[in-house]
Amino acid sequence: MPAALTVEDVRLELGGRAVLDGLSLTAAAGEVTAVLGPNGAGKTTMIRCCTGLLSPDAGRITVLGEPAGSASANARIGLMPQATGAWSGVKPAELLTYLASLYANPVPPADLIAALGITSFAQTPYRRLSGGQQQLVNLAGAIIGRPELAFLDEPTAGLDPHARRQVWTLVRDLRAAGVAVLLTTHAMDEAEQLADRVVLLNAGHRVAAGTVAELTAEKNLEQLFLDLTTPGGAW
């Protein structure tokens, strides 16, 4: 089967700095691809290019067989950003009900609210939620339309261990349903637990890629990360 996502030699400069520098990677349907890298490595910028929020200076991105950012591609993907301010006054239950109405066959909002432990704050305005609670709502919003490809940008940042494991379960359920999941994370154990393949970025380009078993044959994932990457500025 063709890859759900193909990024080929993508280059992008922002503010005179090469944020993506010849980046190439793929993500397959029914697999979790974890993208690791220090702050400033280009992880979030890559996702923005894949969803059409940014346009690369060079290279090509194909999403589910369509050009990145096209209406036909975006209708079949889900995006969980690190943060969103647009939902500040909306209550999670109202938000998810509205988002569900945009799709022909959505996941029932009540199911996501229960699965992600949102029930206790489902009627609290989004702006009053903790960072971790907002993360759970963001994740629910990303997958309520049953996407074929889900981009999850640090989906467990700020979550307590219970909520983190709930998210892990949901990611595994997405994979079992044949969804291609691309997630970014700083948690090495998360990548080890969830990923079918790992891509390690540094300074906007790929420095390692493979299964967890392949990458950790001689050293653990954290040590590999430390050996192959350098601290960078946040983007």
Image (spheres, rainbow, N blue to C red):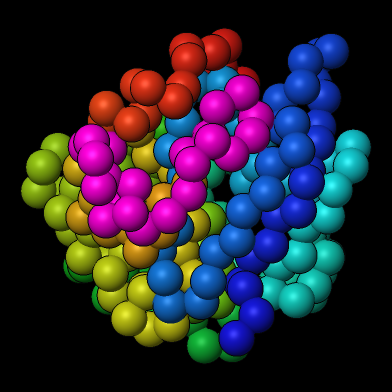
- Within the image, what quadrant is residue 66 found in? bottom right
Q: Quadrant of the C terminus?
A: top right
Relative to 70, residue 157 above or below:
above
**63 horizontally vs 183: left or right:** right
Q: 66 or 81, which lies in front?
A: 66
x, y (%) of residue 189?
A: 20, 43
Q: Residue at x 35, y 21 (%)?
A: 226
Q: Is residue 183 magenta?
A: no
* Residue drawn at x 89%, y 42% as measured from the top left: 58
Answer with left or right where residue 142 lies relative to residue 214: right
Residue 186 visible somewhere in the drawing: yes
The residue lying at 68 percent from left, 49 percent from top is 24
Q: Nearer the viewer, residue 31 or 224?
A: 224
**Where is residue 160 drawn, in percent x and y?**
14, 38
Query: What's the residue at 61%, 72% (across, down)?
Result: 4
Please state which of residues 229 and 114 is positioned toward the viewer in this rendering.
229
- Magenta highlight range: 200-221
Give the residue at the far front of this rendering: 218
